Amino acid sequence: MTTHEAWAPIPNNLFRLGWTKTELLVYLALLCLPFERNGIVIAGQTEISVGAGVSVRTTRDVLPRLAAAGVIVQKQLYDGIPSYYRVNELPRDGGFFRLPRRWLWETSLTATERIVYLVLLSRRNRRTGEAVVSWVSILAEARVTNRTLAPALDALTAVGLITRIHQPRRGKRQGINKYRVQLPTEHVPNM
């Protein structure tokens, strides 16, 4: 990966590692920030929290946990100024998808909507553009509840990032669902 690469490689199995939703979002924000030639990201907690869609306080709580897990190496010089981070990329054995680096900062989606969209993107078949995934899998991988998942899917459908492909079924949304998932670059309307 080069410093000027416009895409960040996101491993498909990232959402199956058992991390919390905020840990996932903060890691993704760090992974999507531009970095120096030596692989160091220089960013303040405010910038990271905007990309992750969480509060600065939450970001401040999550960063030491990611550092303790060995996923990032954090070097903070003084409180309140940008810190230096070395972000360790995770293995891409299960495949990966590319996310435009600035997308997290340009989107107006909530944290729940972002994580649900990224889970669907990780399940997307590159050839067909469809994600076949169960309701329970989305709940588990996105770390959301029944109450927050339905509005998140509705919001993603409303902005045109996903389209539910109708299948004959007995239940409403439970069971296996099929979605056509647009890549962020294919998505033309303003979010």
Image (cartoon, rainbow, N blue to C red):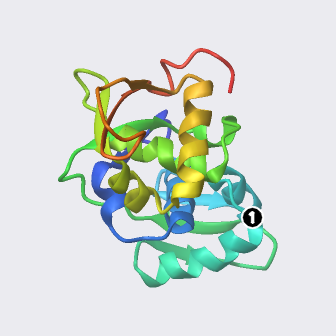
**Which residue is outermost to the top?**
188
Question: Residue 191 at x, y = what percent?
Answer: 68, 27
Q: Residues within 10 Å of mark 1 (few under 14, many from 20)?
A: some
Q: Kindly tell me whether residue 75 is visible in this rendering.
A: no
6 up-or-down from 44: above or below: above
Q: Kindly tell me whether residue 48 is visible in this rendering.
A: yes
- Amino acid type, callout 1: Ser
Front residue of 29 and 14: 14
Front residue of 175 and 108: 175
Which residue corresponds to the image point at 65% horizontal and 79% vertical from the top-left? 61
Could you tell me which quadrant the N terminus lies in?
top left
**Which residue is outermost to the right?**
80
Which residue corresponds to the image point at 69% horizontal and 21% vertical from the top-left? 190
Which residue corresponds to the image point at 55% horizontal and 45% vertical from the top-left? 150
Residue topped by disc 1: 55
Task: Give the number of callouts.
Answer: 1
Question: Residue 47 at x, y = what percent?
Answer: 72, 55
Residue 164 located left or right of residue 113 = left
